[in-house]
């Protein structure tokens, strides 16, 4: 079996007989409302991904399922997790893809010469489980088995220690584990209750936390090879100045930090460039690795990516009176949706509209743990209200500015805000 790396969470797993499964293809810059970009302009095109036997899509986030350019024959087998919240299924079917291979949590199916197992979210929240009632609803992970080899691709579905123990018991050993090492999202880059120095400090704390967590999982799984995978991006456009605060790093940095820790016996850390294929039998790539030059990346951001325009920046500004009515209607609809799923807010949330502060969520007096204010381009807000954009994507894309007092993170509040639309 061979694994060819493309970018972020996109790779092609190929068996000895030539069966190919591509995962989570994102090639074109500008997902998450225009801001997410690759470290460099990719050479891989959608045409290069056509000669595959199936596509695995882990979840609906656009760096895994870029519906703008998702181009495969409509009868292509699409491997997806079979769960109750079928946002991904509905999106795929709306594009005309009906050949969905639905695999339930922990179920294994045969596909040609592969055995494929899928896994629902391993944890509600890897770092804030005690504060989380709803948590992760959409991610999935996959295990490929072929030619006597086993590959675990976690994507964004980062396992906790209990999940790693379950995987170890179920599969014994992995030839390759591909696991996330970053925290994609707005913290600390978008939280203006923090000073610049505090943002830098939180940035480094997040990186160390992520690597420590990854290391403990690798100690349990003890794969033959580990490849840092998924969560690799930089911001373009007017949000590019936030790159230095993101809770993210390059895969080179990840491996460097892992190597500073005690050696995990029998596990080798590997990194791959775009278009490089790694042979699990020989343990060799077909190309010599070229390290990421972070100075080149910064020059690329300044010369090219920072000049990108977001789609909503081409819109007209909304009518103020209608916007305020839509906000109120969306607030009422959100409260009804939260009541249906029994999610009780624990922070007061307000929108900053010009000089006005508009309350959209109020917890009970006994449940309140603080205040969260949110500000964004009103054109993006209008898109969120009418569902042409989504709060979660805008948040992950770093388009929303936050201020919270105290600096308390409520995962369920950020889940609740995903229901804020008409």
Image (cartoon, rainbow, N blue to C red):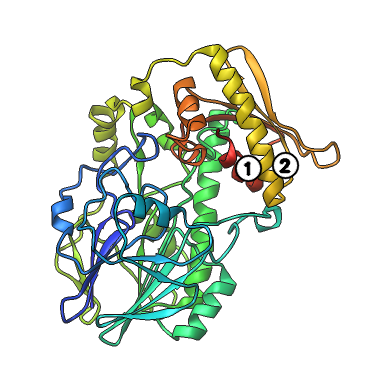
Quarter occupied by the C terminus? top right
Q: Which percent across, then down, holds residue 49?
A: 18, 58
- Residue 164 is left or right of residue 282, and the answer is right
Q: What residue is rendered at 49% in x and 78% in y?
A: 167
- The quadrant where residue 367 appears: top right
Distance between mark 2 and mark 1 Cα atoms: 8 Å
Q: Which residue position holds label 2?
A: 345
- The answer to whether residue 64 is seen in the rendering is no
Above or below residue 18? Residue 248 is above
Q: Within 10 angstroms of label 2, few (less than 14), some, or many (20 or more) residues?
A: many
- Dot 1: element: helix
Q: Are marks 2 and 1 in contact (CB under 8 Å)?
A: yes
- Dot 2: element: loop
Quarter occupied by the N terminus? bottom left
Name the outermost residue toward the right.
366
Q: Which residue position holds label 1?
A: 416
- Residue 257 is left or right of residue 269, and the answer is right
Q: Which percent across, then down, holds residue 211?
A: 49, 59
Q: What residue is rendered at 46% in x and 40% in y?
A: 393
- Residue 16 is left or right of residue 159, and the answer is left
Q: Which percent across, then down, holds residue 331?
A: 65, 31
- The answer to whether residue 393 is seen in the rendering is yes
Q: Within 10 angstroms of label 1, few (less than 14), some, or many (20 or more) residues?
A: many
Pick whichever, 339 or 243, lies toward us. 339
């Amino acid at each position: 079996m061979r694994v060819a790396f493309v970018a972020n969470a996109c790779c092609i797993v190929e068996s000895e007989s030539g069966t190919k499964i591509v995962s989570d293809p994102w090639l074109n810059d500008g997902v998450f409302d225009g801001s997410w970009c690759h470290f460099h302009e990719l050479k891989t095109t959608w045409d290069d991904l056509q000669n595959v036997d199936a596509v695995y899509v882990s979840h609906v986030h656009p760096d895994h399922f870029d519906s703008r350019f998702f181009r495969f024959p409509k009868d292509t087998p699409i491997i997806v997790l079979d769960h109750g919240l079928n946002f991904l299924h509905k999106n795929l079917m709306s594009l005309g893809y009906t050949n969905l291979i639905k695999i339930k949590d922990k179920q294994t199916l045969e596909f040609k010469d592969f055995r494929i197992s899928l896994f629902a979210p391993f944890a509600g929240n890897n770092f804030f489980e005690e504060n989380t009632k709803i948590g992760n609803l959409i991610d999935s992970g996959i295990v490929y088995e072929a030619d006597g080899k086993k590959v675990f691709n976690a994507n964004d579905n980062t396992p906790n220690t209990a999940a790693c123990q379950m995987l170890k018991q179920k599969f014994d050993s992995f030839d390759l584990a591909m696991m996330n090492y970053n925290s994609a999202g707005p913290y600390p880059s978008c939280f203006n209750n923090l000073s610049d120095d505090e943002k830098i400090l939180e940035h480094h704390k997040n990186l160390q936390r992520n690597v420590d967590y990854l290391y403990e999982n690798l100690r349990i799984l003890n794969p033959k090879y580990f490849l840092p995978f998924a969560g690799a991006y930089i911001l373009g456009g007017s949000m590019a100045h936030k790159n230095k605060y993101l809770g993210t790093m390059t895969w080179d940095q990840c491996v460097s930090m892992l190597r500073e820790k005690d050696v995990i016996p029998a596990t080798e850390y590997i990194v791959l460039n775009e278009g490089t294929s790694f042979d699990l039998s020989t343990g060799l790539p077909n190309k010599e690795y070229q390290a990421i030059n972070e100075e080149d990346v910064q020059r690329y951001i300044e010369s090219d990516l920072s000049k990108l325009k977001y789609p909503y920046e081409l819109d007209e500004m909304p009518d103020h009176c209608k916007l305020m009515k839509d906000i109120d209607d969306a607030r009422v609809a959100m409260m009804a949706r939260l009541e249906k799923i029994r999610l009780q807010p624990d922070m007061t949330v307000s929108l900053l509209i010009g000089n006005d502060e508009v309350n959209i969520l109020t917890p009970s007096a006994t449940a309140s743990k603080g205040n969260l204010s949110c500000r964004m381009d009103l054109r993006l807000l209008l898109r969120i209200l009418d569902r042409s954009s989504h709060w979660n994507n805008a948040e992950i894309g770093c388009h929303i500015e936050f201020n919270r007092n105290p600096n308390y993170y409520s995962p369920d509040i950020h889940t609740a805000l995903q229901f804020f639309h008409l």
